[in-house]
Each structure stands twice: as structure tokens, then as C-alpha cells.
Amino acid sequence: MTEVVESPTEGELARLHIHDRHTALGLDTDDLVGMYRTILLARELDKRIWALNRQGRAAFVVSGQGHEGAQVGAAWAIRAGKDKVFPYYRDLALMLTLGMTPTEVMAGVFARADDPNTGGRQMPNHWGSRRLGVITGSSPIATQLPHASGLAFAQQIEGSDGVSLAFFGEGATARGDWHEALNFAGIHRLPVVFVCENNGYAISVPIAKESAVENVADRAHGYGCTGLIVDGNDPLDVYEAVQGAVQRAAAGEGPSLVEAKTYRYLAHTSDDDDRTYRSAEEVEAWRKKDPLQRMHQYLIEQRLLPHAREEEIIAEVKGLVEEATRVAEAMAEPAPETAYTKVFARPLAPLVGAPPGRGDDPDAGAVAARAAAVSVDTYAEAGGEVVDKNVIAAVNGVLRELLAGDERVMILGEDVGPRGGVFRATDGLIAEFGDQRVVDTPLAESSIVGIAIGLALGGRLPIAEIQFADFIHAAFDQLVSEAARIHYRSNGDFHVPMVVRAPWGGGVHGALYHSQSIEASYSHIPGLKVVVPSTPADVVGLLREAVLDPDPVMVLEHKKTYRLITGPVPTSTDWRVPIGLADVARPGSDATIVTYGLHRHLAVEAAESLSEAGEGEVEVIDLRTISPLDRETVLESVARTGRCLVVHEDNISFGVGAEVAALVAEEAFYDLDAPVRRLATPDVPNFPFAGSLEGEMLIGADDIAAAARILLAV
Ligand SMILES: Cc1ncc(C[n+]2csc(CCOP(=O)(O)OP(=O)(O)O)c2C)c(N)n1
Ligand SMILES: [Mg+2]
């Protein structure tokens, strides 16, 4: 049952507004009139946007009517050029205060090419503008909150007095990302202000069914944040709270959570019907507490708004709304072919599936680096200095060197500090570089990735470690909805130079939750690069490339290779392995095995045994990068050998093998002397614990040799 909220009596309103409240807050007449003007502009623009939808001229719109007082009050405390802002979709008035023009807003409403937020790629109100210090946002609720903590962490490390401010509805406070973001902010006393615009509903679900406690701010204490509740329809009240929070944050006094109680007048979006879950009386009661009227009343009582000035403002606002509508509606739509562009900040290969000539050209430097790349053996033969290391020592060595070489590089994850990582990848690094460069995090994968995204957006080069690849699924949203899409969705305004390392794979009695292969799930995602080095030289060369790459790169290290595989590693820090370049691990002429990870080594072993037995010369290709796939190397090999076997530890269905098989079938059909075959784990969860069960599942060199033998016999 919805509760009817009583409106304040005239007497109460008069008591609220009779005194000068603004001088003590440091606000002058220009501020107050400016606040009033911005609220009015937001209201009028919002009304027009809603009308455009009802007229069939705007496909989908979101209204912020009712929230303007909270937004303008908070925004007035934001220091342009210094603070970073993470808005949510209802924040039209916030954006206008920060400097987005009505025409720019309308360009988003009409999804025009010159929409500065997304270039027409996202729905309206998905704000983002590097120029205005507003970080690009998405649709999933609460995902921006770990970014705010991450960026605040970058601000803290930098030693600037900049603050991050994140805005969200009370619905967002049910999500894990909200809790994880506040927890992290509290632990590090970060300069971040969380502003909750609590309008009592998440679409139709009332607050009583969202939370067992009445106030969102009640939770602040539990995270080491200062919690404040304010009247969200009173801009001065909100300003006072947010301004104080910004000051505390800038002074190193830690995070705050400001809860602004407010209300939305219209339906959740143009697609919603709010009559199904709330009464007209309730809406009416809140309209009596309207922030526009209250600001206006305050100005009149304080004699700060002469009638002529008011008329002037009203006329100006009307003109702006008219002009914005006219100008934006006449703007061009994005050119259709641009749909294929800006998936990556640094494209490494032509966009798969795009019509010929569409999509961004691969980065010229990356193409040249691929052409010039040599194997570590060739490198050593040419006189390059190498030392032998196993894979885990190689990882540790390159992480140390990356930290030493660039102060923007940071490592974060569970147990990466004094413990040195459960596999010892970060052994000794915290002692050498300190706990602001090597950061032990709470056990919360979504925020490990989300904080890393925020750090990257704040100018750091984070390397996030996920302890076991099996636990990355909690961060799926952050990887898929956020990291992978940020460049595309912001039309290239933002990018995420972040690395996520994760040990993966089985064969170590890790059972169902310490053995998984995750590469196919993430390689399916446009915007992510996924690499799988399996030799010491490759892990070093690819990690260096990954850290330098402006896009998010997932680096999967097969944990069985860590101590099993030893090999030469160039000592020069110039050693690189280009992302997107496969390696011919063993040349051959009779069949091609395409594989990666531990199975590179097992496939070479199998090929050697077949060769010794005189059964044929099998070429082994180690993909090294899953996405983007090195299609040329695969096709060139198959063209020579006429036979192709794909081997991987991951389950067989919908995996990398399916992708390679499809590629060969589509592009090399006439080169084939036999059907493409796959050798992979059957579709059972990998891997059961008991030695007998795990042994049954694991693919060994003998299995690979047997599969290749069948292919050679065709
Ligand atoms: C993770 C996720 N689940 C569902 C949705 C669909 N959705 C969009 S807004 C919304 C309600 C959000 O409520 P609240 O955070 O209180 O913000 P308000 O809309 O009330 O301002 C829902 C369920 C979504 N965007 N993201
Ligand atoms: Mg809400």
C-alpha cells in the first residue's frame, strides 16, 4: 500500500524560508538566481522532451522533474575543472549546471551524431563528457559507483584535492556494486561523495520492498562513511550537505553519503505507466513541495528576484528550449557506417563481420610491430641476451619492471600484498613499491575490476589480479557492460587502459572452482582483448603490451604452466610480443594443430612423437591471443597443410574451437583435404576433484597425437 505524504502547511513553509539561509552557506545573489534559472531550465527542457516523446518525435525519454532541487543543489558544490562526476540517467538538471547546453541535451534526445555524450549510440540521458569532467555512464544500475571510488583513489594517489561525486537512485543501493564501492571508499578514506536521489521507488517497487532500513544513509556508518539525510527538494539543504562533503573529501577526511529525499513527478520513463503503482494523491502531495516553487519563493521572500529579472529569465529559458529543439532536430543522424567504428581505442585487426571497408583501420604501429616480431629463439640466435625462467618467475619479473618503469602502473587484487599472491606472482612487490602501488583489496571481484576501471579513467595503469579465473564471474558486468563498452559508448571520448590477469585452467586438482577455462565467454565480447600466453617469453612480452595498450586486456595465465614450463626470456625491456599475433610453435607440412595455453606444449610433444614415428609432420600454432584472433596465421598454415585440428581445454561447445573451425570452413574450404576436427573437454563442468574423474577429463599429449593421427589418415 502506498502512503500519502502530507504536504507542509503554509506556516511551516514560511518558517522554512523567512530567514536568510544562503549567506552563511557562502552563496550570493548570483548563485541563488543561477540555481533558480537552472532548475527552471531543467523543468522546461524536461517538459519539452516529454512532449516530444508523446508527439512521436523522440523514441524514448527519461524525466527528472521533481529531482531538480537535489541535482542543482548538489551540482552547485562541484568545482569545475577539479572534481569528477558520475551521474545517472535522471540527472538532467545536474548536467545543465555542469555546463551541458540544452542543444547538446537535445542532440542526445534525437540521437544525433553531434550528441556529445554518446554520438547517438546510447539512449538519451547516458551522460558523459570529458570536457565537463563527467565520466561516461551506462544503463546497468550502480556499476558507476566502483568507478567513482577508483577515480577517487587516483585523485588521492595524485595528491590533488579533486573529489569524485557519484549520483544514483535508492534502487541502486540494493546492488553489490554499491556496497563494494562504499566499502572500498571507507577503507582508503577516499575523496568521494555518494549522492543518493531517493525518490521512494525503483520503477514500481517502493522503498519498503527495497530495503529493511528506512534511510539509505543509515548504512553509511557501516562502511566508514559520513551519512547525511537532506530534504532533496530544498536546493540549499542539499547544497550545504554536499558542499560540506566535498570539503571534507578534499581535506582528506574521507567519503560521505548524502541522501536527498525527493520524488519524481512523471513515470519512470516514457515507457512506464506509474498509475499501476502509485496514487494521483501521492504525486499531488509531493508536487506541493516542488523545488522550483520553493526556490522561487525563497528568492521572492529574500527580495532577490525583481519581477523584471524573473520575466527576463523566463523568456531566456523559453528561447533556449525552442532553439535547442529546433537546432538539434535539424542535426544529422550518425552516418550508418560509423556503427562499426570505435570499438577499440587501438584496433589491432579489421572488425570481424563488418562489410568490406567498414570499421576502423588497424593501428599502423601495431601492424608494423606484428610484421617485425621475431620468436624468442630467433631473438637469442641474433645475439639478444636471454635468461631462463619459469612462467611464474617471468610474470613476477615483468610486473616488478613495469612498476619500476612507470609510476602510473599499479597492481590490485586479493592477497597481492605481503602474501605475494597465492601463486607468488606479486612476491616482494609491496615491499619494494609500497601499498599505494600494490594494493590488497577486499574479497570482492566486481569492485576489483570496477575500481581498476576508475583508476584507469583517472590516469593510472592498473593491473587487476583475479585470484582464480573461476571467480571472475562476479565481475562479468564490470567487464562486459563497462570496461568493454566504454570506448564505443562514449563515441571515443573515454578509454580504459586496464589489464586483468587471471590464472586459469585445470590439471592441478583444483576441482570445479579452481580449474575453469573462461576465455570463450570473454572473447565473445566486443571491446575486450583476451591473451593467453603460455611460455615465459610470451607472458613477459604480452604483459608489457597489455599494460601499454589503451584498451582493456584480459591476460589469462594457465596455472599449470607456472612452474612446469621454463624457457628463455629476453633481459631487455624492449622485448614485446604483439597482441593478436599467433606463434608457430612447431613447423610442419601435413596437418595444423591450432591451440593455446598449456596445450601448446602438449601439442608440440604430440607432434614430436608423430614425427619420430614417421606418421607425419604436424604444425602447431599457439594462438597466444584469442581476441582478436590471428586469422592470417591460421589460414596460411591450413592452406599449406590441408588439415586442421583445434585443441583446447575448455568445453567443446561454443568455444574457441568452434570459432576457428568456422573460420577455416568459411575461408579455407578449398584448401582442406579433411574436415576440421576439434579436441576439447566434453560439456561437463571442468574439472571434478577426484584424481580418477579429473584424469578422465584432461586432454594429454597422447590424446592429441591420437586425434592428429585420425586426421592424418583421412
Ligand atoms: C542492473 C539493472 N537492473 C535493472 C535495470 C532496469 N531499471 C532501470 S532503472 C530501474 C530502477 C532504478 O531505481 P532507482 O535506482 O531508485 O532510480 P530512479 O529511477 O528511481 O531514479 C530499473 C529496475 C537496470 N537498468 N539495471
Ligand atoms: Mg528511486
Image (spheres, grey):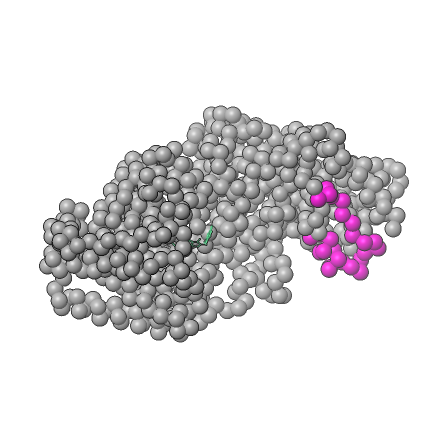
Q: Give the x, y percent position of residue 433.
A: 45, 30
Q: Where on the picture, by quarter, is residue 328? A: bottom left
Q: Relative to 129, say whether 565 is above or below.
A: above
Does residue 439 show up? Answer: yes
Q: Residue placed farthest to the front in the image?
A: 1
Q: Is residue 202 left or right of residue 401?
A: left
> Residue visible at 56% across and 42% down?
473
Q: Is residue 73 left or right of residue 563?
A: left
> Residue visible at 81% across and 48% down?
591
Q: Give the x, y percent position of residue 530.
A: 60, 46
Total tally of numbered discs in the picture: 0
Q: Give the x, y percent position of residue 258.
A: 30, 44
Does residue 372 show up? Answer: no
Return the residue nearer the eye: 24 or 361.
Answer: 24
Return the residue nearer the eye: 436 or 443.
Answer: 443
Q: Is residue 585 left or right of residue 363?
A: right
Return the residue nearer the eye: 133 or 480.
Answer: 480
Return the residue nearer the eye: 615 or 654.
Answer: 654
Q: Relative to 535, say whether 489 is above or below.
A: below
Residue 103 part of the magenta segment: no
> Residue visible at 27% across and 51% down?
232
Q: Give the x, y percent position of residue 680.
A: 73, 43
Residue 665 part of the magenta segment: yes
Q: From which residue to which does the magenta span run?
A: 659-683
> Residue visible at 43% across and 63% down?
271
